[in-house]
Image (tube, grey):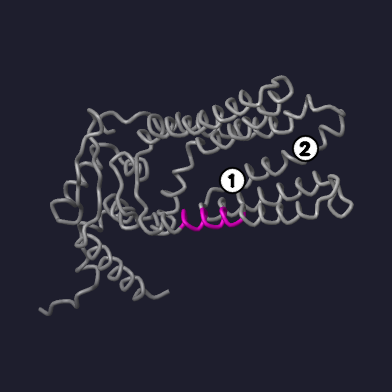
């Protein structure tokens, strides 16, 4: 049995490929940094949802999370790391390549 | 995934959200309203120091309103973002071109002043030329700022500012009194304030306070 040729989709980063995380990472790619509330409003995600995706991306080293306090209330700033930026660029390249190969 | 992700559009939507709260409209409306109040006070108060103090007080109130509103009401609901180079370039262009427009307007005004004789410049009443200069500068400053900041309501605000001075002349000529001149600034100011209030109310309904985060 021969192994089928690898498609760009097989190599795609599944951590980024998930729609909600893709929206989050794409937004952060275009910004320098943003806080939790801003990202919630822009992506339409709930508190728990965003928190869960944030944790996964942080664990992968794609996201830098800075937790501070403004008075008595916590403030969470999120920023894409260099590794996260490169991963997103690679994801874009692979997806573009995949769609370019699809015939009209 | 049915939703197409357009990176530029994502960034633009995030950027435009800064102006969604209507506070900049209210701030600019208050500045125009302050001119209306000054024009009204000018009719009834003789003391120049008091008039100046009231005018400066009005300006300070407008700035405080914007600062307090952003700091305590809208930013905690909307959240904060840094736009990096994209934001810096937009802000710099808007500031630089608006400043240059004011400067050019001022230079043209001073040059024309040099030719002014008995309240006329080349046979045309000086006040009409100043009104044309004011209208042109206001349209240019707000137009450029609106374009570079991607803040479309600045075109309307610019039009209201541009309209105010010529309206002042019309009101004075029409009623042959200065008593109603404040309407020339007051009505455009109220239009700007109404637009700002509409956006602020929509914003407050759309974005409730987020529990937990500051």
For mark 2, does the 10 Å Cα neighbourhood hold few (<14), some (14 to 19), or many (20 or more) residues?
some
Is B75 left or right of B113, judged from the image as shown?
A: left
The residue lying at 70 percent from left, 51 percent from top is B136
Q: Is residue A40 above or below residue B99?
A: above
Q: Are marks 1 and 2 on the same chain?
A: yes
Q: Residue furthest right?
A: B123
Chain under numbered label 1: B
The extreme left residue here reads A1
Q: Is B63 one of the magenta-colored residues?
A: no
> Which residue is denoted by mark 1 in the rendering?
B154
Tell me the residue that label 2 is attached to.
B167
Q: Magenta residues, as a range? A: B90-101
Left or right: B166 as drawn, with respect to B92: right
Quadrant holding the N terminus of chain A? bottom left
- Tag 1, which secondary structure? helix
Question: Where does the image place residue B122, in percent across and percent down from the top left?
Answer: 87, 55
């Amino acid at each position: 049995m021969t192994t089928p040729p690898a498609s760009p989709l097989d190599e795609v980063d599944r951590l980024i490929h998930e729609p909600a995380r893709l929206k989050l990472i794409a937004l952060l790619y275009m910004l320098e940094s943003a806080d939790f509330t801003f990202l919630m409003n822009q992506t339409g995600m709930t508190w728990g949802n965003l928190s869960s995706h944030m944790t996964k991306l942080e664990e992968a080293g794609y996201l830098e999370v800075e937790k501070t306090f403004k008075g008595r209330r916590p403030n969470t700033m999120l920023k894409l790391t260099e590794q996260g930026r490169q991963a997103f660029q690679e994801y874009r390249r692979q997806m573009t390549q995949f769609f370019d190969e699809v015939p009209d | 995934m049915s939703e197409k992700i357009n990176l530029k559009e994502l960034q633009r939507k995030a950027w435009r959200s800064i102006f969604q709260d209507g506070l900049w409209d209210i701030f600019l409306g208050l500045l125009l309203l302050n001119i209306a109040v000054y024009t009204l006070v000018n009719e009834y108060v003789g003391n120049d120091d008091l008039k100046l103090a009231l005018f400066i007080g009005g300006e300070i109130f407008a700035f405080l309103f914007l600062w307090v509103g952003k700091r305590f009401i809208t930013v905690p609901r909307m959240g904060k973002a840094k736009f990096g180079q994209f934001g810096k370039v937009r802000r710099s262009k808007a500031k630089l071109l608006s400043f240059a427009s004011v400067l050019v307007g001022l230079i043209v005004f001073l040059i024309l002043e040099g030719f002014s004789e008995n309240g006329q410049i080349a046979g045309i009443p000086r006040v009409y030329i100043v009104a044309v200069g004011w209208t042109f500068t206001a349209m240019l400053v707000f137009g450029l700022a609106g374009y570079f900041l991607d803040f479309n309501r600045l075109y309307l605000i610019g039009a209201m500012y541009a309209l105010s001075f010529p309206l002042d002349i019309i009101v004075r000529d029409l009623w042959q009194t200065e008593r109603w001149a404040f309407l020339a600034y007051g009505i455009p100011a109220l239009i700007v304030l109404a637009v700002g209030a509409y956006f602020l109310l929509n914003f407050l309904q759309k974005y409730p306070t987020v529990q937990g985060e500051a």
